[in-house]
Image (tube, helix red, strand yellow):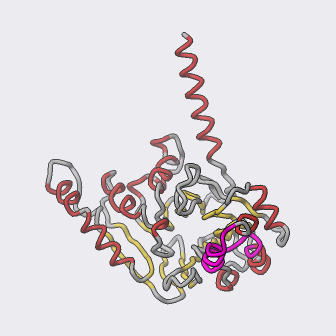
Amino acid sequence: MKRILSLTLVLIGIAQTHCMAQRNFSDSETTKLVLLGTGNPNPSPEQSGCALALVVNETSYIVDFGPGLIRKAASLTPRYGGTMEALKIHKLNIAFLTHLHSDHTIGYPDLIFTPWVMGRDVPLTVYGPTGTASMTDHILEAYREDINYRVYGAEPTNDKGWRVDCHEFDKEGEIYRDSNITVEAFPVTHGTWPNAWGFRFTTPDKVIVISGDCKPSQKVAEYAKGADILVHEVYSKAGFDTKPEAWKIYHSEHHTSTLELAEIASQARPGKVVLYHILYWGHSEHDLLEEIRSGYEGEVIVGQDLDIF
């Protein structure tokens, strides 16, 4: 009896933890933004790598492919106790990539192959900057034996879902449109990385802007002007001040501090600012918010994995 009671308490605790991990801020039945990963290259157990999903009229659109994105998406589906039909793994068919850094692309093979194994029977459509096609070709070649075995072996699978319909872009402006969504790409500065981009998504009832990885950018402020949500990367300024000089030089050229983000938000005045790709450096969510509030009075939310907006 004691063992049964203990097991019951453990299961209740797991269920409570799962529920607490999902914070739903959404006010729309049409458009939802899901944070599948809010982390960075540091392997934080609490943060999967950078990955987002927009769900519009029950169609999903993935943005960036950080490690863990497939399992985080799966956790929100009915199969694993969630409610989001659009994130069923075999339905992950359209994706966008801000840049090719490893923490944004390590999950790319997972996005190609796991939905196929789970039944996707159409090619994955991907829009990414110059270099995406080469990366895609090399991933497919690396998994050639796996593809051949699944297609020509005993496994009942199809010969379409592993394929990738890849579209590269290198100019600012509209890169994709369907009945649910219009996607615009705009260049951002991420050190000397030659092809780093942010995105503006316009749906029937929302405008959502995603910074990607970047130092403070006037393009972000321009495209986020009056947006409903600005999702922006950030690092703690107080943590930055403790870094060695070499790392200060690096981060100041590649990323955006809390104080700098406050200036951007003050120019753009979005409905809310959501933080992701967060570098805490020993500081708390409260510390980040206090730093931003010193220069910006609008709504700011420190993003957590599985948040829904």
Residue 83, image x, y percentages: 54, 46
Q: Position of residue 171 (x, y in %)?
A: 49, 89
The boundaries of the magenta stretch are 243-261
Q: Is residue 53 visible?
A: no
Q: Which residue is at 35% across, 55% downward?
A: 114
- Image quadrant assignment for residue 152: bottom left
In the image, 199 versus 247, the foreground residue is 247
User: Could one spot residue 213 in this view of the protein?
Assistant: yes
Task: Identify the residue at horizontal 58%, vertical 74% (top origin).
Answer: 213
Choose top left, top right, bottom left or bottom right for residue 30: bottom right
Q: Position of residue 201 (x, y in %)?
A: 58, 74
Q: Main secondary structure of the magenta part?
A: helix
Between residues 130 and 82, which one lies in front from this camera angle?
A: 130
Direction from residue 290 to residue 252 in the image, left or right: left
Residue 252 is a magenta residue:
yes
| Residue 60, x across and y down, in percent | 49, 62
- On whether residue 269 falls in the magenta region, the answer is no
The residue shown at (48%, 67%) is 104
Using the rendered view, name the quadrant where residue 137 is placed.
Answer: bottom left
Which residue shows up at 61% across the image and 31% down it? 13
